[in-house]
């Protein structure tokens, strides 16, 4: 059973890599260039609108913690979701 769980986790990581959507809900988007440390979180796929996308090896909790630590933004103003909200991360245009 343990081996099955490990295999499922590996498959999940391949099929649905850690792509996070950062949604600037109640605050204006920031400029990525103003926060160079954000590049340590992963490969930013989109960062010019109110919805950013990032391919990251971090788990969601670590990604959120580092994002808010770096930006000093209020978590109440930002929504971070794994995979995306309202999109299919397996469609062309999303880096896998």
Image: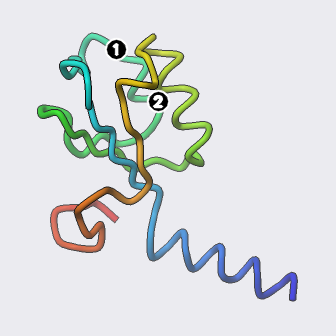
* In the depicted structure, whether residue 30 falls above or below residue 7: above
> Considering the image in quadrants, where does the N terminus appear?
bottom right
SS for dot 1: loop
> Residue 16: which quarter of the image?
bottom left
Q: CA distance from mark 1 to mark 2?
A: 10 Å
Is 74 left, or right, of 44 in this rendering?
Answer: right
Image coordinates for residue 49, horizontal then vertical, percent: 12, 34
Tell me what residue is drawn at x 42 percent, y 25 percent: 76
Tell me what residue is drawn at x 23 percent, y 64 percent: 87
Image coordinates for residue 3, horizontal then vertical, percent: 83, 85
- Nearest the eye: 58 or 22: 22
Tell me what residue is drawn at x 24 percent, y 19 percent: 27
Which tag, 1 or 2, sits closer to the chain's start? 1
Q: Nearer the viewer, mark 1 or mark 2?
A: 1
Is 26 left, or right, of 65 in this rendering?
Answer: left
Image coordinates for residue 35, horizontal then vertical, percent: 34, 14
Is 63 left, or right, of 91 in this rendering?
Answer: right
* In the depicted structure, whether residue 58 falls above or below residue 9: above
Image coordinates for residue 37, horizontal then vertical, percent: 43, 19
Residue tagged 1: 35
Residue tagged 2: 40
Neighbours of disc 1 within 10 Å: few (<14), some (14-19), many (20+): few
* In the depicted structure, whether residue 63 falls above or below residue 12: above
Residue sitting farthest toward the right: 2
Is 96 left, or right, of 29 in this rendering?
Answer: right
SS for dot 2: helix
């Amino acid at each position: 059973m343990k081996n099955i769980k490990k295999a499922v986790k590996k498959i999940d990581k391949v099929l649905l890599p850690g792509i996070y959507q950062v949604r600037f809900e109640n605050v204006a988007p920031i400029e990525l260039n103003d926060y160079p440390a954000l590049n340590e979180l992963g490969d930013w796929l989109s960062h010019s609108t109110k919805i950013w996308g990032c391919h990251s090896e971090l788990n969601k909790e670590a990604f959120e913690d580092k994002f808010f630590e770096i930006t000093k933004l209020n978590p109440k103003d930002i929504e971070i979701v794994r995979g995306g909200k309202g999109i299919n991360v397996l469609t062309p245009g999303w880096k896998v």
